[in-house]
Amino acid sequence: MGSISSSSTSTHAALVAHQIHLSKLAGVDSVEVHDPFWHELLSFSQPLTKLRPADVEEFMHPYCAQLVVNNDRTRHFGKLLVHVVDMLRGTSAETRSLPLRAVNSLHFTRVLVKYFTEHATGDQIFRLLQGPNDASSSAGSSILGATVQAIFEFLIKSEPTPLTLLLHLEAMNLLLVMASTQLTSHSGTSDPHDHPFLAAMMREGVLAPGVVRTLLLHYMERRPLPPRLPLYQATDGPGVLARVGAAAANALMLPFTLPYKLAGSASGSSADSERKPPSLEAPLAEVATLLLLVLTHHDPGQGGARNPFRAALDACQDTVHDGHTARIAATSTTSAGGKTPTESSGPAKGKEAEVGKGDGGRDSVDGAEVMRVPFGALFDTIGMCLVDDRSTLLLYSLVHGNPSFLEYVLVRTDLDALLLPLLQMLYNAPSRTANQIYMLLIVLLILSQDASFNANIHKLVLPAVPWYKERIVPNITLGSLLVVILIRTVKYNLSKLRDVYLHTNCLAALANMAPHVQNLNAYASQRLVSLFDMLARKYVKLQAKSTDQGTGKQPGLKEVLEEGEEATELNIYTDFLRIVLEIVNAILTYALPRNPEVVYALLHRQE
């Protein structure tokens, strides 16, 4: 047991030297929790993070399978968690050397947990998580709860340094692997029995605000990797999961294999040709974002109990409020509109966030605890990273669930910093998933409900839009560009996706904007009129076909089904046509003097 056919000699040598200890861990003889064996087990000869993950997992599989069988008698996994908890609580941010033993302990535990989530049933996992009978009082009644609590407290209270950054990375990766039962559960429910690790995390409601704030700060600060960090680097290109189109698989499975190589979906579109290669310089930020999204979007499923992490994200406030201050030191950048943002001091990369260090960025308002983060840095970072699926979902979560962040976005004067990358992604809709397009459109729909937003986007003039390839659009307003991209998305959906929900969102956003449109670009006006013309021609064609079928012979079953589908399509196009007419009517009724190009486009189409 334990032999592998890997070509990685270093991986094989490092683990073979530990075979005796691994056999004892998986064996039938119980070892006391305070036995020196546990110290020897976790004292690997080299960093496990430097070894090829697939080789480590392949070597460990036989031992993991044996541990599942024998753990009911030995409770070795629970005893291992006791030592992991003690090690985390004993690690200080002021350490003067790499906490290699703690890093190896978390990595080793992650390999075991990954095997359990993939191969063990819910009942087996529950039995594996039983604490030792002779556990110390510090472990508490629930060893799983104590482990989750220790990891959360470590992440909240310990500031990452060049020496402890790897330990923070491993701690978050372990939590991600624990949450992966969502991928392997066959029940499709949120029953705590099916997801014991996530259920334990949901019980840490007191720590939830601190965890959410810590993960958001990691996302904004984007700490680079220290030099010579013992981290495995793949040399044969991106792995299979880096090319998977499903965002959920990419988000949750990636930490199992290449937690440091976080890449988006591969694509040959013009947008991706301009994208920079996925960066390995800020893995802590990327893993923190994944963990934040997993925690905030899990449904506890316990009689309507609310997710405490989602509640914390929805309730967070800006640090620049009621005497709180946030200093973000960095070089300010100029937005695409040719001006320098004034609300914040530029992108969050390379910044040092000093946000309420004394009180953890939290205070009390009307007796309720409020968690605070710098919205300025968060806004800039999302705009900078929006091309990534994780940032798209984070933006959607904040705009949809956090009214304070939505209000902050609406009062920004440099909306182009956020909207330009968002519109570029919609422009390249063929290379995006349907879910990503939906989220972006819902964000636009929410923003377009505000009158000040609709007015401000027509005041921002863009000197050029280099990624727009159909034609050169110099000195176009952000509002005109938004109209052009939404119409383009509608036409793409008509020809490819044929999704009614997507149509409705696009046209609803245009309808919200219509009464506030001003100085609509000539090209945008032409596109709007051409959209009406295209829908009208399709409507007339469907209407004529429906009339012809009504005068024909007695239809069969196939003809009846086809007629039903065509009648539904006719009703859909009727609704679309009505909405577009309302959009044009709103522009002519409320904003006619400010939009002469719309009138010219209508007259030109009439001719």
Image: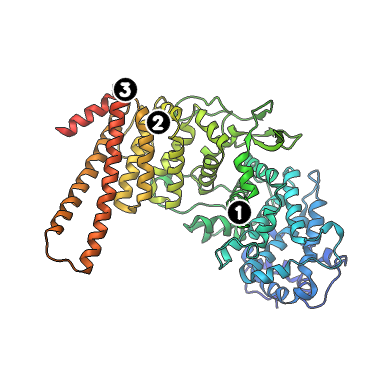
Quarter holding the C terminus?
top left
Looking at this view, is 36 or 558 the one in front? Answer: 558
Residue at numbered disc 3: 594
Label 2 residue SS: helix
Do we see residue 237 in this rendering?
no
Determine which quarter of the picture holds residue 565.
Answer: bottom left
The tag on residue 505 is none
Residue 177: name its quadrant: bottom right
Q: Secondary structure at mark 1?
A: loop
CA–CA distance between discs 1 and 3? 50 Å
Could you say which is closer to the camera, residue 76 or residue 51? 76
Front-most of 6 and 434?
434
Q: Horizontally, is 121 left or right of 604 in the view?
A: right
From the image, state whether disc 2 or disc 3 is nearer to you: 3
The type of residue carrying mark 1 is Gly
**Residue 304, numbered label:** 1
Kind of residue indicated by mark 3:
Arg
Contact flag, marks 1 and 3 (Cβ < 8 Å): no
Image quadrant of residue 547? bottom left
C-alpha distance separating marks 2 and 3? 16 Å
Residue at 52% in and 47% down: 393
Amino acid type assigned to the residue bearing label 2 in the image: Leu
Residue that label 2 marks: 478
Q: Residues within 10 Å of mark 3 (few under 14, many from 20)?
A: some
Q: Is residue 77 left or right of residue 118?
A: right
Real-space CA distance between mark 2 and mark 1, rounded to the nearest whole angstrom: 42 Å
The answer to whether residue 366 is left or right of residue 141 is: left
**For residue 71, above or below residue 196:** below
- Sequence-first tag of 2 and 3: 2
Q: Residue at x 25, y 59 (%)?
A: 564
Question: Is residue 428 at all visible to an observer of this figure?
Answer: yes
